[in-house]
Amino acid sequence: MTVPALQLDGLRKSFGKTEIIRGIDLSISAGERHAVIGPNGAGKSTLFNLITGRFPQTSGTIRLHGHDLKGLAPFEINRMGLSRSFQITNIFPKMSVFENVRCSLLWSQGYKYSFWNMVSRSRELTEGAMEILDQINLTSRAELPAGVLSYAEQRALEIGITIAGGADVIMLDEPTAGMSHSETDYIVELIRKVTEDKTLVMVEHDMGVVFGLADRISVLVYGEIIATGRPEDVRGDPKVQEAYLGAALEAEH
Amino acid sequence: MTQTAQERAHVSAPASGITLSRLMPWIIAILFLLIMPILFGSNSAITIMNQMMITIVFALAYNMLLGQGGMLSFGHAVYMGVGGFMCMHIIRMVEKYGIPLPLPVLPLFGGLFGLGLAMIIGSFSTRKAGTVFAMISLGIGELIAACSVIIVVFFGGEEGISGDRTYGLPFFGIEFLQQKEVYYLLAFWTVLSTILMYLFSRTPVGRMANAVRDNPERAEFLGYSARWVRYFSFCASGFFAGIAGGMFAINYEILTGEQLSLIQSGAILLITFLGGVGLFFGPIIGAIVFTLLQTVLSLQTEIWQLYVGALFVAAVMFFPGGLAGVLMMHVPAIRLGKLHLLIVPYIRTLVPAVLCIIGVAVILEILFHVRHSAPGDNEMTLFWITFDSHNPVAWAIGAVLALGGFWLARMSAPDLRDAWHRANTLDGGAA
Amino acid sequence: MDLVVINLIDGLVTGLLLFLLSSGLTLIFSMMGVLNFAHASFYMLGAYFAYQISLYVGFWPGLIIAPVLVGVLGALVERYGLRRVHQYGHVPELIFTFGLALLIEEIVQFFWGKNIVPFEEPAALQFALFNIGGNAVPAYKVFMIFVAIAIFLGLLYVLTKTRVGMIIQAALSYPKTVEALGHNVPLIFMGVFGVGTALAGVAGVIAGPVLGTFPGMAFLLGSIVFVTIVIGGLGSLFGALVASLLIGWLTTFAATYNFEFASILTAFGMERPEDLSESYLRDLWVLTLPQIGPILPYLLMVLILVVRPYGLFGKRDA
């Protein structure tokens, strides 16, 4: 059996006395599109922050392609091929859109902390950045400061920055949060397009997006995964309906 | 915001390398530097220009931290000062032991020592940006400044250390006896440092400095350690500050503990900010304008620092982009070909505003004279007019100027705002 | 032994004085996230205002009026200056307060000149309260200690026992939530800034006669105050207290014990060179503890920051 792209074993996280993540075992194989859903406060964002090294875990292990991530800083994890987006748009607002994307290409193209290369002289960098801009439909916005883009465009840029580095595991935290229907459709198409042949882990509230995109779904409730499986199986699971979908449906009506 | 125009020019010609239009500002600047001593050959003019060039290099180095890296330092004079002190020691050793080291390469050593110090201090101070960095820089600055009175061997105590630049080997027959020779030497280092600092901002680590400034956390998720990016910027900034120190040593032939003090560090912050931190050339404008302002004002009035302080506070509050930011605000209007719309409203608002400022200055000067002149000495001269400072008419003129100017400027301000809006809007309504 | 007691008292005076400044600074910092570089300038204004008032009505009214004036001025600065700059971010805020510090120093020079002004302790307190081993302890010093402790207790009471104090404490950690609960957070900010600067004003009034009232007094003490709150941990009131006393005693003791570094060098088996002017270590041979006293706080800060980046009691990421 091949090594899973991401594997969590007995992952726990406490803030003070409160245990937010209460023992998660999860295995996501390479190339899979995996969605994590759950009610508010279930610990989804915390789970993301643990995997990407933003917070240290209390116990348990996280493995990326079989390598233990314990104690690594976010930038080290990123260099191992894991990239993430943020729930609250997290771009470089004062830099141009083009510059935003180009900066996210620098490390993967091997520039490191170079101060002897001129970024504008590298054809690969410029073309790579233009290619990404083309993928996220922001070519016409390339020269604008990222801070002035519309919300949906900023979300698209956020995804562009996330995928630019060529990471093979992409984690998206609520990519469609706060979007209108047409904007959501645009982002879903975009995600589908840019994550081809990659492993995708996403947190999402919009069930349409989840069932449209994901190969498998995990349901996280109070820090525990109560079900994992293919969308139709999860949808039919009575436990899930009780704990989450029911509540979500109620909230919608 | 102010960065966009620069970046825009950058995107429109990606990877195309060096073009004439991009080289033009540099060529003009270099020609300008070459002919300045011919136009203004007096010793005092050259003294001012030398001071300007040293300040330009230091301000640009400082802006590598503040503008490009988002790090506010209250102790950057230390790197320039230590670079300068080391250069002074080298000059003395050249004199004492006859080391064959030509004077023109001296700033490089200043830079290396600035770099060395920055590598040590930066290793712990760049761990955090923001307030913590600012406070550490302040503490280190005060620490080293205080050491200047304790470690007399190195800093020379109260009187500092001095040397003679002309004792070294002549450099192609030039002995640097004359101010003009020194001018061209400093001009060479100014141009070289400016080009290098500009190129640094175009390298991967220079670009990432901007990214870390805007959003350190996001930069970490792009594979870069925010701390290392800050460290590299810090070291580079220390290097160029050290070069400025070397230039200082050559020009003034003396360094004192004052060069390391918080006053110097604060001055460079003020200069850089007034010039504009958002643009590469902002600090250059700041250095030129401030040096001129200092020279002119300090000859005219005793309270010039009060005016500079007020100008600084006003700039932080109303023009956070500095002078360069104000200039760049007009680029959209120029692009639309509508700058002429602004000329008349500008005159109608700015002339009364200037009158208002003059009125306030008159009142301040009179008040200062009344409070601090010797008893019985009521005569003072202001704007080439001599009058009695206790005469109410003088006060009244100042008050009328101040209030009248203020009122007129206020009245015409809405017109200016309208004109500004029109000049920045495309014809046909759409913005 | 007597000298130790005297030093303990002197250090306590310095430490409490520092605390009057650092407590206000800490309150302002933890609430608004801005380190008020001009804080010591308000301390200076307190001294000068009290001096000006003392020329007309004597010392005592100034002890009340000057801090109130300083506090009002501080509140105005917050309302019309800082609030405007706040939108640009933390670094411009810090630059603004730095510019303000420069400007206030110039304004003080404008009105009162560059020299020290004759601001003296009230005649009623110009006597030695008691003697310890032949060293007189001036009544004014004891008075300073009492004023500082009274203000500290008052602050403690307001912060922990009153409704306003509860709101302030809550706003320290969760300003947005407090605002959502219907409290006027901008007004609280203005109030805290005013009170913080007024505390600095009090410190200025009582310190002016002892430490001297001159335009450089703000920057002289200001840097030490920043060092204090960095050592204590930015945003920690308790840390500010500990660090203030620590620095107070450290500098006082260092200033009195004429310890020579030559003795260390001798202990390492080095011999004092005949001709010191030729030795590269000559500064070490003549160095004494009082000489390095003033830089000890900075050294301490660097050491602490290398070991504990958040200071002694700091938790929050600044």
Image (tube, rainbow, N blue to C red):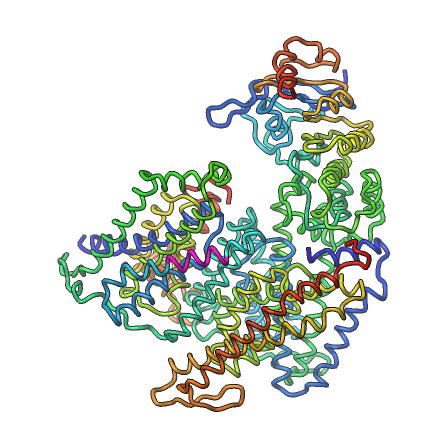
Q: Is residue C80 magenta?
A: yes
Residue C193 vs B355, above or below: the answer is above
Going 72% across and 72% down the picture, which residue do you hit? B343
Judged from this view, the residue extending furthest toward the front is B411
Instruction: Give residue C214's position: percent from left, percent from top.
Output: 35, 70
Which residue is farthest top? A238
User: Which quadrant holds residue B330?
Assistant: bottom right
Query: Would residue B109 be seen by someone viewing this image from the given angle?
Result: no
**Residue nearest the viewer, comparing C187 with A160:** C187
Question: Residue at the location (40% across, 70% down)?
Answer: C108
Instruction: Determine whether, in the image, residue B404 is placed left or right of residue A195.
Output: left
| Left or right placement of residue C21 versus residue C55 in this view | right
Q: Nearer the viewer, residue C197 or C138?
A: C197
Asked whether the viewer can see residue A101, the reply is: yes
Q: Split into 4 quadrants, where in the image is the C terminus of chain B?
A: bottom right
Q: Position of residue B109 (x, y in %)?
A: 63, 66
The residue at the point 72 percent across, 69 percent down is B342
Q: Which quadrant of the view contains residue B390? A: bottom left
Quarter of the rendering occupied by the N terminus of chain B: bottom right
Q: Is residue A174 depicted above or below B57 in this figure?
A: above
As displayed, is residue B3 above or below residue B55?
above
* Residue C114 part of the magenta-drawn span: no
Above or below, comparing residue A11 to residue B423 in the picture: above
The secondary structure making up most of the magenta span is helix
Q: Magenta residues, as a range?
A: C71-81
Residue C7 spot, x, y in % from top left: 24, 55
